[in-house]
Structures are given as C-alpha cells and as structure tokens.
Image (tube, rainbow, N blue to C red):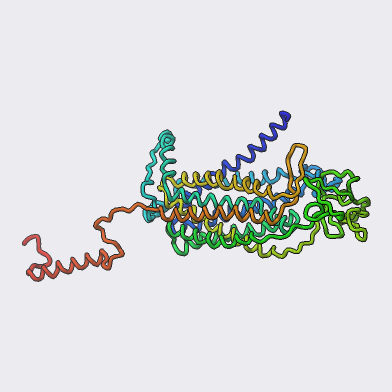
Amino acid sequence: MTARTSVVILAFSASSVSPWLGAAPLYTLGQAYIDESVKTKKVALYLGIFQAVASFAPALGFVFGGVFLSLYTDVRVDDTKLSIDPSSPVWVGGWWMGFLLSGSISLLISVWVMGFPTNLPGHKEIAKARISEVQKGSEFTVRAGFGNSLSDFPKAAWTLLKNPPFMFLNGGVTMEWFILASVAVFGPKFVESQFNLSAGLAALLAGVVVVPSTLIGCGVGAWVILKFNLDFRGQMKFCFGSLVISFFAMLVFIASCDNVPFAGVTEPYKDGYFPENLNISSTCNIGCYCEQKFDPVCGSDNVMYYSACHAGCIGKIESDDSTTYTGCSCLPSDANDAVLGRCETSTCNLLPIYLVCIFIMLTLGFFTIVPSITATFRVVDFSQRAFAVGLQSLLLKALGSIPGPIIFGALIDDTCMIWEYDCDGAGTCWMYENEQFAHYTLKLIMSCRVVSLFCFAASYFTHKPIVKEDDDTPSLDNKETLSDRDSDISMKKTYAEKALGRPKTRSRNQ
C-alpha cells in the first residue's frame, strides 16, 4: 500500500466517522431536549416524528445516491462522448456529490440549531406538572462544573447499570435491533435466493417493504402512547403485545421455495454426473478448460449452467437485448441453445405472502422504537436522560445492529452451495440452499424474539417507582375538594357566631 493510498483511505474513514460524531448529540441531547420542552403526553408524538424522519432519510439517500452514480465523476467531461455508460464495469459515478450535498445542508441547518436556547419557554411549568416514574434507588444529583462531571461519571454509569427496568429494556431493544439489522442487510439476499430474482429487483422489493414499515411503525407507536396516555408499565405492555403478534408473522419462514435447477448442483448433467467442490465439469465440457468464473446461462432445457463454457457451447449470437449461445454439448441435442443470464422462471408463488408477513413483522417491531425511548426517559433520573439514551444507543449497536449481520452472515454461509474464490481468498456465494436458508433465518430471529419478550416482561415486573409519602394536603380524588371543605368550615363558623349573639363586625371605637 502506497503512502498516497493510505492518505486516501484515512480521508474516507474520517469522512465516514465525522457525520456520526455530529449526529450523536441529536439522538441523545436532542431527544432529551424534546422531552423537557413539551408536555409529557405529547413527547411520544414529537419523538415519533423524529424517528420516522430519521428512518426515512437513508432511503432518500439511496435514491439520490443512485442518481449521482449515474452521472460521470468528472463533471468537466462530456459523458456522451465516452465509450462507456453507467452499466459498464469501469464506469465511475459521482460518488462525491452526495457528500457535498449532505455536508452543505448540514452546515446550513447547524447554524439554525445553534440558535436554540438552553431551555424553551414554559419548561418550568412542564417540569412541575411531570409525574415521576423514576425507578426507586436510581436518584442522582448532578454537580456543577466540568471536573465534578468527570468525577461523577463512574457513579452515574453505575446508577444506570443497577437500574433493573432500564437494563432489561436495553436488552429487549438490543435484541430487536439485532433482528432488524440482520433482516435489513440480508433480506434482499434472501428474497433474491428464494424467488430467483435479480439483485436489483430484490433490493427494490426490500425497500418497498422496509421504508413504509418504518414510517408506519414509528407513527403508530407514538399515536398509541399519545391516545391512551400510557405510563411506563403501559408502554412495556404495548411493546410486549406487539412483539407477540409479530412472533406469529415470523412463522412464514417455515415455508421455502425449491432451488432453480442448476446443472451439477441440484440437477445432474445429461450424463448423470454430479461434480463436487465447484469442479463443475462433466464429460460434455471436460475438454473446454473452463474458468471458475460465475457467468450463468439458462439452457433451453430450463436448467441453469455455471457459464456458457460449462454448458459446452461453441457458438455465440449477440443482439441488442440478449446474447444466445449455440451448439451447447451439455444440453439435449434437440434443443442445445442457452441465453446469457439466470433462468427467470420460478414455480414458487410464495412471494406475496412473504412480503406481507415480513412487512407485518417489521412494522410491529418498529412499534417498540418510540415507546422504548419515552420509557427510558421515565424510568431514569431526570438529570440522566441524555446519558441513558447514549448508553442505550451504545449497547444496541455494540450488541445488536453491529454483530447481528455478522452472526447472521456466518450462519447462512453454511447454506451456500456454490462458492467462487478470488485470488486473495475472499469468497462469493452464488447459490444458497433455500430450505436451510429459511430455517436458519427462522431459528435466529425467533431466538432473539424470545429473549426480547423476556426482557420487556422483566422490565415491567421490576419497575418500582419512587413512592412519596402523602402529606395532609387532600387529594383531588376524594369526594370532597379543598374548596368544599373551606366552604363548610366558613358556614359552621357563621352559624356559631349567630348562636352566641355575636355581631359579624365590631367598630374599633367600641
């Protein structure tokens, strides 16, 4: 690696890290700022809008990214005069345009954000009206001064770590993000494998399912809290019930589709030979000395071959929209042509059912996002809200959204039927065993869901809010209000004075 390459990699790494450094306070301090600036009943509404917009933004980024990548990276060059187009492997799109656009917008918005005051008007009245649901034993007092804040950090962290409902809530949220991250990364690959779709169409279908489920899930979760004014325990019950219903939608992964017929993998060559370990050769192509490079063709017998060479083809006819190979010795003699690309035919009709069930599963999972944040604000001390959200974000990423796709990817690698290895040893899987793929997915997400349900239930049962001793001040729930009692006392005093013959008023001169 040259020094120049090292500098470029370092610059790319810094450009990837810096946006998250700026966004982190929005998800910690920003949400705490919303919580202390609006009435408790309406916090969920504003947090729901915040989470919905935050979830929709990546989808918008993919759309603009696709547009920018269709433009040539050097805007000074007239791409119409080039001999390549965006479909060419050597095409370099405008990868830098998205950074420039998002960076410019962020700078403009940051100027506006810096104008916000420390507290919005009316925050004192909102704080007085707030009903405390802080876990007993989790009280914490913040001392002023930067030095005191640093010395109090271990105590503050320990106060949160020994808060049972908060930690169980973190466990449930972490497991849900483990599921959501795994499905988001490998969902398109699953759909592509099960239904023999192109990678582009599979990604499009995944986007059609994920984006609406995110918006609906965050919106409905916020609306339920607002409509029924749910307290901490009510929110835990709502999360638990939503995930139980979602549990049944996961059962769709019991069903799976048959793999597309693939010569030498799922179907024998016409001579009945089954190769092993990617030695996809037979007597019909043994003399072709084929490269182990996946470039599939679909034969006229509706069987897919690893490449035209592995199909034993000797002729090639190109047209504007397709490439046909002829004289393929591995195909039946009466129909020995093959077309470049995968076989598009599939007898599996489960795609609509799968998409609907995955949509339900994700939507109900997203129901828990807003309740988990508002519940976090309620169960920790008021001074620790931002720290609690930051700790929760750290845990769900370190134990959920980051290791989730890694573990899931390692599991489904065991279901791979066709590997292609590069010179550096990196492998690419071109076909998965669909039944095993579906069952591994089912086992993983259902295991995580069971842990998640246990954590939400434990958070409900371990919640013991601080109970303040009642003073002599009467409650509004009593039949008699304070004003009624004062009125009765005044009337009794008047009657007593009349009975004793005392005048109501006396002159000072008397």
Answer above or below: position of 277 versus 41. above
Pick out the residue farthest to the top. 3
414 with respect to 126 (left or right): right
Residue at 56% from the left image edge and 57% from the top image edge: 366
Q: Position of residue 108 (x, y in %)?
A: 60, 46
Q: Quadrant of the N terminus?
A: top right
Residue 71 or residue 458, whichever sits in front: 458
Q: Position of residue 29 (x, y in %)?
A: 49, 46
Residue at 73% from the left image edge and 63% from the top image edge: 348
Residue 225 or residue 345, whichever sits in front: 345
Residue 277 or residue 476, whichever sits in front: 277
Answer above or below: position of 498 versus 373. below
Is residue 341 visible in the rendered image? The answer is no
The quadrant where residue 92 appears: top right
497 with respect to 436 (left or right): left
Q: Position of residue 369 (x, y in %)?
A: 53, 55
**Total of numbered circles in the picture?**
0
Residue 469 or residue 198, whichever sits in front: 198
Pick out the residue farthest to the left. 510
420 with respect to 120 (left or right): right
Is residue 6 visible in the rendered image? The answer is yes
Q: Quadrant of the C terminus?
A: bottom left
Residue at 72% from the left image edge and 52% from the top image edge: 432
Q: Position of residue 478 (x, y in %)?
A: 28, 65
